[in-house]
Amino acid sequence: MNTILLLLILLPLFGAFLLPVVGRHLPRRAVEIIACASVLGSLVMAIVAFFIGGQKTYVLTLLPWINVNDFSAAMSVYYNPVAAIMALMVTFVSSLIHLYSVSFMREDEDYVRYFCYMNLFVFAMLIITLSDNLIFLYLGWEGVGFCSYALIGFWYHDIGNAIAGRKAFYLTRIGDFAFGIAIGLFFITFKELSIFYINGHALSLGAKMATVFGLLLLWAAVGKSAQLPLVVWLPDAMAGPTPVSALIHAATMVTAGVYLLMRMFPVILQSPAALFVIALVGAVTSFYAACSALAQKDIKRILAYSTISQVSYMLLGVGAGDIIGSMFHLLTHAFFKALLFLGAGCVIQALHEEHDIFQMGNLRDRLPVVYWLFLAGALSLGALPFTGGFFSKDRILLATLSHPELSYKLLWGLAALTALLTPLYTFRLFFIAFLRRPGRIDREIRPIPKLMVWVLWPLAFLSLFGGFLSLPAIWSGGEWLSQYLVSVPGTISLNIPPSFEWGMEIGSGFAAVAILIIAYFLYYPTPFSFRAFWEELLFTGFYLDWLYQKMVVLPYEGIAKFLWLKIDEGSLDQGIDQTGNFLPIFSAGLRQWTTGRLSTYLKMLLLGFTAILLALAVGWYYF
Amino acid sequence: MTLYSIIFYVLATVILVATLLAITRRNTVHAVVYLILSFLGTALLFYLLGAPFLAVLEAIIYAGGIMVLFLFIVMMIGTGPSAKRVNLSQWLPAVILGMISLFTAAILLFSVPLTQEPLIAASAAPIEFGRFLFENYWFPVEITSFLLLIALVGTLYLGRQETKEEKK
Amino acid sequence: MIVPYSHLLLLAVLLFVLGAVCSVSHRNLVMILIGVEIMLNAAGLAFIGASLHWQKLEGQAFFLFILAVAASEVAVGLALLVYSQRRTHSVDSNDYSLLKG
């Protein structure tokens, strides 16, 4: 296990060190392969660790580090189910984004620097995810801040980008300052800097000390996760390349703040005041960001404000005491936000670097795949029923509403209001940027490489179906994620009466669909004329004929056609015809294997070897 | 991090990189030369793992005999550098299956507590090894010599110049 | 004291997989044989490692036999290769498809 975790963390570092040294002398493909392979290797290690780890907790020392007098800090890791899930998510999304970057940066000459910083970022993020020692975590914390600065200002020849990078660095630094103080205070209070130790002894903290810790850690999270008041760096950070925005400012770095609070939750749990402040910051920032998103013109700025709003939800979840819900929303948000950013990147490149949504449009025919996948992400962000975002957001809202204190009910109100605004700005974005604009001549789109679009598919699948990771009990779902994470200290299992939960889910589902319809009427590109609408309504007899057509005639014809072509001719007739044909077809299929070519036989040998190895492994594990 | 483990990791890296380069070369001669490098690295690794006799044997027979034989054959046949690029349908299934088996084997290896113990350095002096081999396994050694004889005969027969009668 | 046993075995497995990939993905017969050699070497490495782990010499003895077998197999294999190349003037494995059914 030691080795696996060590490899998990070190593989991206290996890539980050190798690339600047030899990158310029290697062909471009080799550099891209090294960068992607190191992150994919980390993904493999994360999967292996997940399967081996089960639900156990590991506290392992990987390497000795600082050892001065009687103070020692080692590079140790604290691996529990929360860390396992986070590591899986970080490596998975990073791998996809590295693959996407290979295509996205295909015309940039500075790719060595880009991939070096991306690998370094993944390394630092994995340190944050797994670290046990607080100073080691601080190393990772600063590392992600630095890489964020380097990558935002990647195209530094344009001075605006460099300024945006600096702004990000300053503001997160203000937060890191509080984290440094917190580390010092932890050492004074506990004489130990291991998270595992501190969490174990959290009960010995008085409420006042716990409040101080909670507020300091909250300030650090506010800086890193772009919450009020340190929120202004994230919209400007969109100056960086889009994959950077997807990785750093959607899925990983901005969630690092929330993750830190989750790791140190037993400490914060001792102080209800700190928890309330966290929830308050979360709810207010969420509302603030959703309102701001409603009026933006740049597609990436809308997504940036959306990120702020959604990360605030996670903060609200932590403040309400529900770590599992927060983690669940972290996961679904990573998937759909990365999908949205990467899709936006495809659109931006296809439309010749156009960022203004009012200049976009007509993308259904021109970029069909991106259109539908982006729609999938938008559905999940707007928390339309049955998507991943729906279940995770509902869980957080339920946790907030069912909290015993009254003040949380007010926060729930704010969060619910934000939940109404979210589908509004999301579908505003979608309708204006993607739908048809009649009467406008469009430029030819640039063809975009297939890899950029393929990467979107797994993210779309996870956005839409990720909710099944933790279906609430009322849907007789497995609640797999909740069961998995429950063993971690500080988590609670929500006990909500089923009727309450039903009401909430149905209510929010209806609300989301209603807002979608409102957004449709407000933002649909064709101008809406009331008179034209009335005239048409009365002319067609209140659309009665249309209604009958749509509801009765067309479905009937459709079913009849289906029954005729597919079942009658297709299944029955063909079935009888093909039964006799079965044997020739079967042997023709088998004949494919006897090509007489050595390469086919060798492939089959390797396939058989792999199959036997897998069978042995499965047999070993389960018997 | 003892000296032995540093040497092990360095050698392991050399071996892996050399083998990786060997299997991705289009020019067969380049591939063979990289493989010689890999085998020399393996020979050093055997020395580290306490088999000095076998280390020398690996360098002489494997790297110095078998690989040189490959070079002879390649130069005799004359497969030029015009070898076509290995296309995707060729190497993709191989790489995918390879990764699956690597992954499975890694999980198997790391989930058994037996394999987590460190190796203890030891060395088998050639004289001890020779004594052991001929005391316990003299029969397989005899069979091996027989095997080599058969291989020799077979190779000579296969590689003969065809006389005019045989061509007809 | 050197390294954990699993690291050595992992190295052997990695080399074996590299050899297998080389064997399966090349069409040139010489590269296929080279892949086989890599696999044999990897197996030998595993044996030497095992012999060090259990502190017995059987593993090293068996490596000697592997060496002998590899040598004879290479000799015969290359002789076959030369023979067939003289007949069909090609070392591309796709050209040897007489067994096609």
Image (cartoon, rainbow, N blue to C red):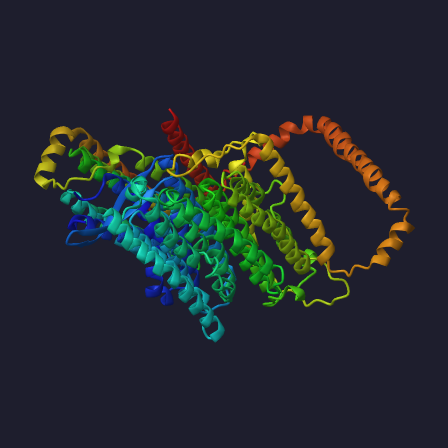
The image quarter containing residue C67 is top left
Lateral position of residue A197 relative to residue A118, left or right: left
| The residue positioned farthest toward the top in the image shown | A623
Q: Inspect this view and state whether residue A277 appears.
A: yes
Nearer to the camera, C90 or A176: A176
Nearer to the camera, A6 or A384: A384
Lateral position of residue A51 relative to residue A550, left or right: left
Lateral position of residue B27 relative to residue A481, left or right: left
Instruction: Assign the C terminus of chain A to one quadrant of the image.
Output: top left
- Give residue A389's position: percent from left, percent from top: 56, 45
Nearer to the camera, A26 or A386: A386
Q: Could you tell me which residue is drawn at 83 percent across and 37 percent down?
A: A552
Tag count: 0
Q: Could you tell me which residue is drawn at 60 percent across and 68 percent down?
A: A352
- Give residue A367's position: percent from left, percent from top: 65, 57
A600 shown above or below A29: above
- Give residue A534's position: percent from left, percent from top: 87, 54
| The residue positioned farthest toward the left in the image shown | B127
